[in-house]
Image (cartoon, helix red, strand yellow):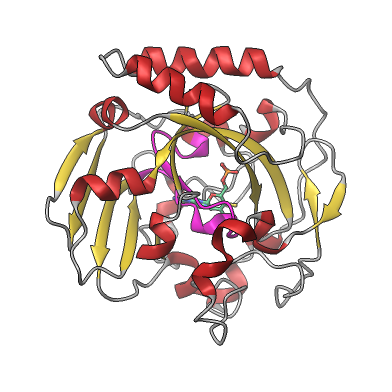
């Protein structure tokens, strides 16, 4: 009964959205640098600007055109606001300041960071990543933010830390979905410490050269590009280093469909649909799914000792 109601990810997808022009790289970069300037008016601004420029040179080239900005910002999964894709207007009411992120648990230096202090302190850069939802749609998104590893280094993980748990905002006044009691709120996600420290794992605070809009998880969200999108928790308020594997939102709801690992794999079907191909939002083109979403060179070694675990669901 419970599971029958939780079918949002298999709801019919919305109508194909009209394609809008992809912003030129130059325009995008100007926006990203502008964002770095606006959000970090500190002596670090120069460093942030050059980091943005360096990263955009293409270390993680997605080899796909960017998804039109309007599509990425109006086709969202955010169950706190509802199970439809078009929550973006309702989400706009969510205040993104003041905002603090607590970092605690098995760390030498637990800290609470005001979001703007974090932006000033962390090395802001841009990453264009493929973004793959378990529902078999995909986007290519220019995120800005900083590697989670930089934040972990600042709080000094202790020897016993094995997992990183992400807790997200619970604001019933703004989030009507929280009234649905059959979901295990708040939305929690988790990674192993090794996954969290991987160079790809990113805390994104911006999108298309602007601060992260509420519907995409502003002011700060996780991006784990080799895993299905449900691992990439939005609106993070607490990051805890722990010794036991945390219970996560979708795994609690249906472990056989949304497992802890959730690494992208075209050869492991979701129990109710194929993962062999994916639909690109913006053009509706269907393209083959890539193992680890194409990031195997960076992450496959994380799993060499774990091949008996259900890594791909
Ligand atoms: N984070 C929270 N807090 N709540 C959610 O419902 N949905 C997840 C993930 N993070 C979700 C979340 C899912 S299923 C996906 S595919 C991505 O966010 C979608 O991110 P996007 O809307 O920016 O494309």
Image position, residue 83 (x, y; %):
58, 52
Extreme-bottom residue of the structure:
308
Image position, residue 180 (x, y; %):
45, 59
Task: Please report the residue visible at 52 percent of the width from the left and 53 percent of the height from the top.
Answer: 224
Q: Does residue 251 sit above or below 52 in this rendering?
A: below
Residue 253: in magenta span: no
Residue 232: in magenta span: yes
Extreme-right residue of the structure:
285
Region rendered in magenta: 215-236
Q: Nearer the viewer, residue 172 or 153?
A: 153
Evaluate whether residue 169 shows in this view: no
Q: Quadrant of residue 124?
A: top left
Task: Please report the residue visible at 15 percent of the width from the left and 45 percent of the height from the top.
Answer: 111
Q: Quadrant of the N terminus?
A: bottom right
Evaluate whether residue 131 shows in this view: yes
Answer left or right for 98 relative to 134: left
Answer left or right for 177 relative to 278: left
Task: Please report the residue visible at 51 percent of the width from the left and 81 percent of the height from the top.
Answer: 306
Q: Quadrant of the C terminus?
A: bottom right
Task: Please report the residue visible at 53 percent of the width from the left and 84 percent of the height from the top.
Answer: 309
Q: How many marks?
A: 0
Q: Quadrant of residue 265?
A: bottom right
Q: Does residue 308 sit above or below 236 in this rendering?
A: below
Q: Quadrant of residue 256?
A: bottom right
Image position, residue 69 (x, y; %):
66, 27
Q: Nearer the viewer, residue 31 or 220?
A: 31
Q: Nearer the viewer, residue 306 or 183?
A: 306
Answer left or right for 270 relative to 159: right
Image position, residue 82 (x, y; %):
54, 49
Q: Nearer the viewer, residue 208 or 76?
A: 208
């Amino acid at each position: 009964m419970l599971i029958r109601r939780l079918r949002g990810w298999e709801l019919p997808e919305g109508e194909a959205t009209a394609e809008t022009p992809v912003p030129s790289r130059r325009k995008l970069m100007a926006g990203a640098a502008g964002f770095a300037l606006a959000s970090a008016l500190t002596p670090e601004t120069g460093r942030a600007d050059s980091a943005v420029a360096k990263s955009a040179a293409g270390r993680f080239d997605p080899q796909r055109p960017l998804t039109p900005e309007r599509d990425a910002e109006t086709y969202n999964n955010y169950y706190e606001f509802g199970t439809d894709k078009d929550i973006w207007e309702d989400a706009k009411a969510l205040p993104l300041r003041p905002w603090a992120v607590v970092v605690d648990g098995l760390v030498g230096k637990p800290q609470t960071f005001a979001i703007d202090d974090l932006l000033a302190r962390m090395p802001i850069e841009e990453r264009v990543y493929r973004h793959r939802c378990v529902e078999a749609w995909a986007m290519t998104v220019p995120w800005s933010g900083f590697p989670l590893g930089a934040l972990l280094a600042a709080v000094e993980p202790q020897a016993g830390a094995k997992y990183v748990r992400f807790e997200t905002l619970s604001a019933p006044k703004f989030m009507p979905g929280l009234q649905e009691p059959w979901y295990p709120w708040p939305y929690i996600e988790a990674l192993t410490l090794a996954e969290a420290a991987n160079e790809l794992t990113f805390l994104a605070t911006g999108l298309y050269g602007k601060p992260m809009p509420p519907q995409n998880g502003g002011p700060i969200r996780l991006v784990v590009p080799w895993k299905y999108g449900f691992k990439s928790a939005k609106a993070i308020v607490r990051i805890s280093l722990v010794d036991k594997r945390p219970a996560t939102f979708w795994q609690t709801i249906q472990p056989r469909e949304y497992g802890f690992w959730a690494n992208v794999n075209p050869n492991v079907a979701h129990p109710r649909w194929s993962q062999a191909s994916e639909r690109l939002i913006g053009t509706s083109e269907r393209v083959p799914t890539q193992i680890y979403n194409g990031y195997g060179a960076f992450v496959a070694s994380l799993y060499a000792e774990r091949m008996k675990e259900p890594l791909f669901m």
